[in-house]
Amino acid sequence: METQRMLLFVALAFVVLMLWEQWQRDYGPPPTPVSEFNDHPSTRSPAETGIDVPASPALAGKPVAPAPAPTMTAMDQAQPIYVRTDLLEVEISTYGGEIRVANLISYPVDIEHPEQPFKLLSDELPDLFIAQSGLLSSSNSAPNHHAVYASDKTRYELQRGDDQLVVDLHWADDDGVNVIKRFTFTRDSHTIRIEHIINNRSSIDWSGRQYRQLQRSEPSSIGESRFIYTYTGGVIYSDLEKYEKIDFDDMTDADLSRDITGGWAAMIQHYFLSAWVPQADEANHYYTKSLQGPRYVIGLVAPEYTVAAGTQKSLVSQLYIGPKIQDKLEALAPGLRLTVDYGWLTVLAQPLFWLLHKLHGLLGNWGWAIVLVTVCIKARSENSPGRAAR
């Protein structure tokens, strides 16, 4: 029983240390400042971007021709689209419909500068981290994330009283195939619904696949915990293998190639993550790539779909960009809450943190919540049968 009590106190100390780390992040020395959301987007040269379109998986036996390297002319045609909701400030580029910047409004970089939100996604080195998606086709033209879209507006904002905000980007080829890339933002949510709506007005069938990926550089060590190792890198989840870390060294050593139904793919760090979540019944090919820079890609390619001439089809995914809040993550996808990693103390720390969270909700004070949890542990150990026998 003494051993049990010791383990409980160790787990509690671990949780308290995590809270202290968060307190340091909020009240301690500020990290390196990030630029505010403004009208001066950074750009990446074609050489930095490279050929990062995924290869076609052998799901249908039809290879996709390699995408040409992006040109400066195409990038010069791009416009930044600024989107603001109650929780997110996002910059979407008409160049491929990439999400190049995502600021978390509710999470300032430090308590002294509440107006400066934490930047999770960024297209600036050394901490490049962007979300990309597009279409691939072996027989038809299709907009990948190097295609140039058009937009009716350059600014969108979720209005008071509205629950959703829709941003549409438009692409069309010369044969009559039109694609709307639709971003749907929802109030009180860090999840973005992203659709490729394919309207085939041509005289022949259109066949292709949807892909979604996260690309990032290995981040700098600035702002990392000095006491607790925190994993930064890729993660995938499947019903068969469950939660799997795919770190940057793994991506360098070999490309991931795995067929998974449902699941999700993410890039995670200490407090935050970004994750692509497909439809639960959709069979996807999961992959990683190591690029020059170095940069790393983790993503998934859907099976081939056919859109008959004169018809329309919508391909849907969810993109989460935000904090590791367990209940919200679990509601989005099975296993996503596992991105909150307590290490070998998970069995003890997770229920203790759950209790702390509940007590904090009642008391509104982490200090008193910790005191009450400590009292509960002590009372439990004092009243245990082994203790009473002595």
Image: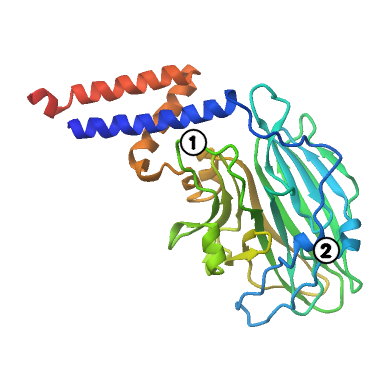
Q: Which amino acid is tagged 2? A: Ala
Please tell me how crowded label 2 is: few (under 14), some (14-19), or many (20+) other residues with Cα within 10 Å: some
Task: Name the element at disc 1.
Answer: loop
What residue is shown with label 2? 147
Task: Say which of 214 and 33 sits in front.
Answer: 33
Q: Nearer the viewer, residue 44 or 235?
A: 44
Q: Residue at x 53, y 65 (%)?
A: 261
Mark whose residue sits in front, 2 or 1:
1
Q: Quadrant of the C terminus?
A: top left
Element type at mark 2: loop
Asked if residue 381 can be seen in this view, the reply is yes
The vertical placement of 165 against 66, above or below, is: above
Residue behind mark 1: 226
Image location of residue 93, percent across then percent down: 81, 51
Residue at 68% of width from left, 63% of height from top? 292
Distance Cα–Cα, label 2 vs label 1:
42 Å
